Amino acid sequence: MKKLFAILALLGAVGWCAPVMAQDKPAAPAAAPAAAAPAAAPSATAAPAPTPNKGDTAWMLTSTALVLMMSVPALALFYGGLVRSKNMLSVLMQVFVVFSLIVVIWSVYGYSLAFTEGKGWLSPYFGSLTDRLFLGGTFDSTKGEFATAATFSKNTPIYELVFVAFQATFAAITCCLILGSIVERVKFSAVLIFMVLWFTFAYAPIAHMVWFWPGPDAYTAANVVDAQNAKAGLLWQWGALDFAGGTVVHINAGVAGLVGAYLLGKRIGYGKEAMTPHNVTMTMVGAALLWMGWFGFNAGSALEANGSAALAFMNTFLATACAVLSWTFGEWLFKGKPSMVGAASGAVAGLVAITPAAGNVGIPGAFVIGLAAGLVCLWGVNGLKKLLGADDSLDVFGVHAVGGILGALLTGVFNSPSLGGPGFVNNWFEMKPGFESIMAQLWIQAKAVGVVFIWTAIVAFISFKIADLLVGLRVTEEEEREGLDINSHGETAYHM
C-alpha cells in the first residue's frame, strides 16, 4: 500500500503542474546564467532578425554533452567508489534514474518555471507555469521555425532548445549531488518523491531568482532599463553574480543534503565501524571525468564561443589544479600522508568554488579561489563536519555548500577590475561595464547566499518529511546491514 501511495504522490506532483495548454502561443522566455531572452521581433522596415551562429550552437551542444558526462558517468563513479561495495549499485541506480527523472519534469514544467517571465507578485520568484509547458512554443512545426533565446551580447541569439537542454543538465546534476549526503540508508522510493518536490519548490525558483532576466536585447533605450530590470529574478535584480551555479547548484544541493543527513540519521555503525571507500580507483576516474565535463559546465555558461568562455575555461583549469595542490599539501601537513581520495576531493572543491566566479574573475582570482578552496573544504569535511555532527556520507555539505559559499563571496571580491576582474555590465542599454566597490558587491553576494541557504533548507525539510510520511525515508536495519544493492534493486555490483 505504501508503494501505491508513493507512485500516486509522484504522479500527482507532476500532474498538478500540467494544466491544459494555453490556447495562445506562449511568449518566448527570457533567461540567463545565463540569459535566454527572445530575440526582438523585427518591424516592417527593420533588418531581418539575427540568426544563431553555427559556432555558438556547436559549442553549446558540446557543452551540454560535457555536463551530461559530469553526472553519468562521472558523478556516479565518483560517488560509487566512495561507498561500501554492498551499496555500489544503489548509488549508480540513484544517479542514473534521478538524472532521467529531472530531465523529464524539466521538459514538462521546470524550464517554464525557471526561465520565463513570472506573473504578478510571484514574478521575482517563479516563472510562468504555462508559457513553456511541455516546451510549447520552442518549435513551430507548421512553419519549421525554431524559437531563439538571447545570450549576453546584443543581437547574438542561440536556439532556445539548445538552452533548454543545457539547463536541463544543470538541474539534473544538482539533484544528483544531494544523493551523496544520504546514500547507504535511504529508500529509493523516498528519493524519487523528495526529488520531485525539492526540484519544483527549491531548484526551479532559485534558478529563476538568480539567473532569469529579460536579456540584453530588451534594453532598447535608457528609459526602459528600470522596467526591464523589474522583470528579472529577485537576486538578479539585487545584482548578485553567479556565472555557472555557485548558489543555484552547489549551495542549493549542499544545504539540502545536510538537511537530509540530519533527518535520516547516521548509518548503522557510523563512527564505530570502518566505512572506507571500496574503490578509490573508480573515484579518481570519476573526479577526472568531472574535471573534464566541468569545462562545459563553466565555459558553456558564457552561452557563446567567445572571450568570456575562454576566461571561464582557463579559470576552471587553473583553480582546480590549485585546489588539488592545496588540499594535498594541507592533508599531508595535518594528517601525515596525502591521499588519493583527498586529491580527488580537492579537485571537486576547486571546481565548485570557481563555478560562480568562472567568467566573473580574472586569472589572479582563480589562483586565490583555487588555493583557498582546497584548504577551506579540507576543513569543511573534517573540523566542520565534526561540529555539525551529521552523517553527511560523502561530504556534500563540506565540499559543495562550503566551496560554493566561498566561491560566491570571493566572486564579489575578485570581480573588481582593480584585482584583475572583468567587472560587469551595469548599463545594458549602452553595454557599459562597471563596478561599484568590493564591499558593496560582497554584501550583495552574502545576501544571495543567505537567501538560497534558508530557502533550500526549508523546502528540503518539508520535502523529506512528506516523503517520510508517504513511504518512510530509511530502509530497515537488516536491509541496511545487508546492503542496498540486493535489497533495493535485487542485483549486486560485483560477483565474487
Image (cartoon, helix red, strand yellow):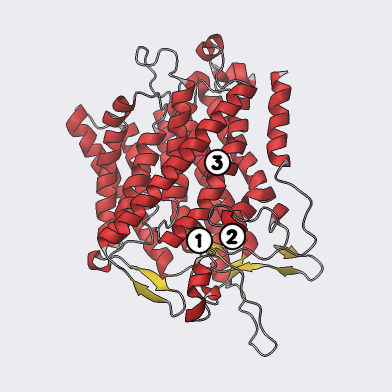
Horizontal arrangement in the rendering, residue 238 relative to residue 495 (left or right): left
Name the amino acid type tagged 3: Val
**Residue 384 appears at what percent x and percent y?**
29, 31
Please give the residue where the numbered disc 2 appears in the rendered image. 163
Q: Residue furthest top?
A: 478
Closer to us: mark 3 or mark 2?
2
**Residue 67 appears at what percent x and percent y?**
52, 50
Name the amino acid type tagged 2: Phe
Please give the residue where the numbered disc 1 appears in the rendered image. 34
Secondary structure at badge 1 equals loop
**Residue 255 appears at what percent x and percent y?**
43, 37
Which circle's residue, 3 or 2, is located before the other in the chain? 3
Compare residues 290 and 35 and report the one nearer the observer.
35
**Residue 58 appears at what percent x and percent y?**
57, 64
Compare residues 86 and 243 and report the one nearer the observer.
243
Horizontal arrangement in the rendering, residue 491 relative to residue 259 (left or right): right
